[in-house]
Image (tube, rainbow, N blue to C red):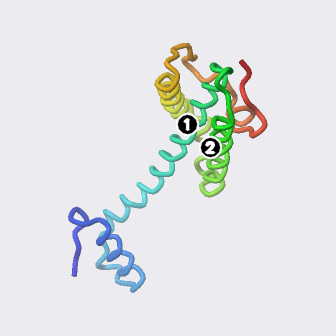
Amino acid sequence: MSTRYETDVVAWANEQASLLRAGRFELLDRDHIAEEIEDVGKSEQRELASRMSVLMAHLLKWRHQPERRGASWEKTILAQRKEIAYGLSDAPSLTPKLQETRWLEMVWAKAVAQAVGETGLDCFPDTCPWAMEEEVLNDDWLPDA
């Protein structure tokens, strides 16, 4: 039985895994397997970007709405930092993203959009004012008002 990638990707993936395990390399759909492997890396990058933007949005809210600070925001900040650290320990090749200007600009833009949407404020800086490792990812750091 041959399942087409375009028809049912889950059945296709299971079939490809079985072929690999059986050593039936001549039957493998190499092009689509290569695409799927590349997509795993892209998915990890998107996950890191998503967590970073949530973290930064909460740091922005913490900084600009001191009267609304609470345990919920603090727990979200801590949880995102822990998830980011865990993700980077599983995929250390993503660490350079934290210094990549273009990537950080995209993450910051998402964080600002989220913070604006959740606060109604439009006073946030155009670029991230905080150092990544020393501040943003530091469990002991929160921005002051």
User: Which corner quadrant of the image does residue 75 belong to?
Assistant: top right
Image x and y of residue 117, in percent: 46, 25
**SS for dot 1:** helix
Q: Which residue is drawn at 65% across and 53% down?
A: 86
How far apart are the two marked residues, 2 and 1, measured between alpha carbons? 7 Å
Closer to us: 61 or 72: 72
Looking at numbered disc 1 in the image, what kind of residue is underneath it?
Val
Closer to us: 42 or 65: 65
Q: Which mark is residue 54?
A: 1
**SS for dot 2:** helix
Mark 1 crowdedness (10 Å alpha carbons): few <14, some 14-19, many ≥20: many
Q: Residue 39 carries which label?
A: none
Placement of the N terminus among the 4 image quadrants: bottom left
Task: Kindly give the residue lying farthest to the right in the view shown.
Answer: 140
Placement of the C terminus among the 4 image quadrants: top right
Q: Which residue is drawn at 55% across and 32% down?
A: 104
Q: Do the residues labelled 2 and 1 touch (CB within 8 Å)?
A: yes
Considering only vertical position in the picture, is 33 above or below 127? below
**Which residue lies under the disc numbered 2?**
80
